[in-house]
Amino acid sequence: MEDILINCSPRETRVGVLTDGVLEDLHIERHASRGLVGNVYLGRVMRVLPGMQSAFIDVGLDRTAFLHVLDIEHAHQPGGETKPIEKLLAEGQNLLVQVSKDPIGSKGARLTTTISLAGRKLVYLPGDTHIGVSQRIDDESLRESLRERVSALRSDAEQGGYIVRTSAEEGASDEEFREDMAYLARLWHEIQQKRVGLSAPALLYEDLSLDKRVLRDMVQSGTRQILVDSPAVFDELRRFAETFVPGVLSRLVQYSSERPLFEAYGLEEEVAKALSRRVDLKSGGYLVVDQTEAMTTIDVNTGGFVGKRDFSETVFKTNLEAAQMIARQLRLRNLGGIIIIDFIDMASDEHRQAVLSELRRAVAADRTRLTVSEFTELGLVEMTRKRTRESLSHVMCETCPVCQGRGQVKTARTVCYEIMREVVREARQYRDARSFKIVASQTVTDMLLEEESPALGLLQDSVGRPVTLEAAGEYAQEEYDIVIL
């Protein structure tokens, strides 16, 4: 069974999804940096880049947003050819766009001109006539039935197409489809009306807040309860549910215990683990997760697990457990882009295929689109997972000011030798200097006075002038200054 926990504070909302008591998904939205995916803007084309077949669009954000020719609705021509972007857009042109990916790192938001508006059971496509069905609905007869029902309910005068959402799989009525159609048509009309008279850049439509999106998008038949720890937010969600998602009303529960919600369910500890580089497995093995700008790498190690049988069985069992944990960590950390998994080497092809099958089974429940490749010649598994928002570590952490994101710092001895070389260089450049003072961290000055004191004596003899030390408590280990006296 699934439980959804909504923890609210004045400037932050956190949502944890538990399956049988285990945290499987985590979402965080902060008022100061709310996600932009789904927002509709009237933008202005700032630059068209034919060489990249892309354009930079000003939508009023800190950084210009990015639009690729493949994301332009009418760029596709018969025969599979794509019309050049320079023939579709011109600098200074106003353009209706929607955010498909949040700004990530130094990259601006990714845009599309294919507008889609989400309802409870349907997604409305104003610029299309297609009736589609979510790929997550596998039953082909049900897919065809839903497609026919929506086609029949759409009026002849109505413009636009629809995609039937996964939530309709549980038995959506014609009345629910009609209500969605009326609501989405009204919403699109309001966006068009708002556009009149506005100059670009301008925000025309903002998607729902995280707590409301939970009710609209994340509640399914297996959801037992939705716990909300804020009375004000609970009342707001209840009113929202009465109007838009009455089916979830009975599962909305106000959490009133004095113990904090996330703490009571052990989620604070899970969040801390999701920020750690190392992830321990129950068997004694562990994962090492490293994020870089280009990709994420996941290394699987046996650790202290020795097993009861031969080594190949130990490796196989560790890899199977790792496959399940990797799928969970992808969701918790919201890892996207290219992901490389280095499973422990397996000699048996049967074992490799079993691990790959387990990985694919484990990621099948992921709401984010992803692909999993076969094992490469080097024994690696390559994955891609759609990146639509910042990862958990990028939301909650920042680059260490001491190591600048390297994850390590120079040893005190290395810094000592750097300082000595710098003193020699300064002595040659400033021959009139009477003495030199080294200002460094306590650790470095202690090493210069103790273990490296002979080297410090040789340094003074080499430069022919006194060298004194001063410990600065506020200095990091790699920081130092040389003062010429």
Image (cartoon, helix red, strand yellow):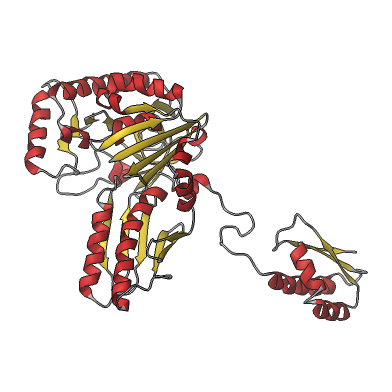
Q: Is residue 310 above or below residue 69?
A: below
Image side of residue 223 versus residue 403, left or right: left
Q: Quadrant of residue 299?
A: bottom left
The number of discs equals 0
Question: What residue lies at 6% left-to-right and 40% top-to-bottom?
Answer: 141
Q: Position of residue 198 (x, y in %)?
A: 41, 21
Question: What residue lies at 69% left-to-right and 72% top-to-bottom?
Answer: 414
- The quadrant in which the N terminus is found is top left
Question: What residue lies at 32% left-to-right and 30% top-to-bottom?
Answer: 215
Q: Quadrant of residue 116?
A: top left
Residue 62 can be seen, yes or no = yes
- The quadrant in which the C terminus is found is bottom right
**Camera-side residue: 460 or 259?**
259
Q: Position of residue 383 (x, y in %)?
A: 31, 59
Image side of residue 314 versus residue 107, left or right: left
Q: Position of residue 412 (x, y in %)?
A: 70, 69
**Camera-side residue: 43 or 209?**
209
Q: Is residue 386 above or below residue 425?
A: above
Q: Quadrant of residue 228?
A: top left
**Camera-side residue: 327 or 257?**
257
Q: Position of residue 315 (x, y in %)?
A: 32, 72
Residue 154 can be seen, yes or no = no
Q: Is residue 315 above or below residue 32?
A: below
Image side of residue 36 versus residue 119, left or right: right
Question: What residue lies at 33% left-to-right and 38% top-to-bottom?
Answer: 3
**Camera-side residue: 275 or 66?**
275
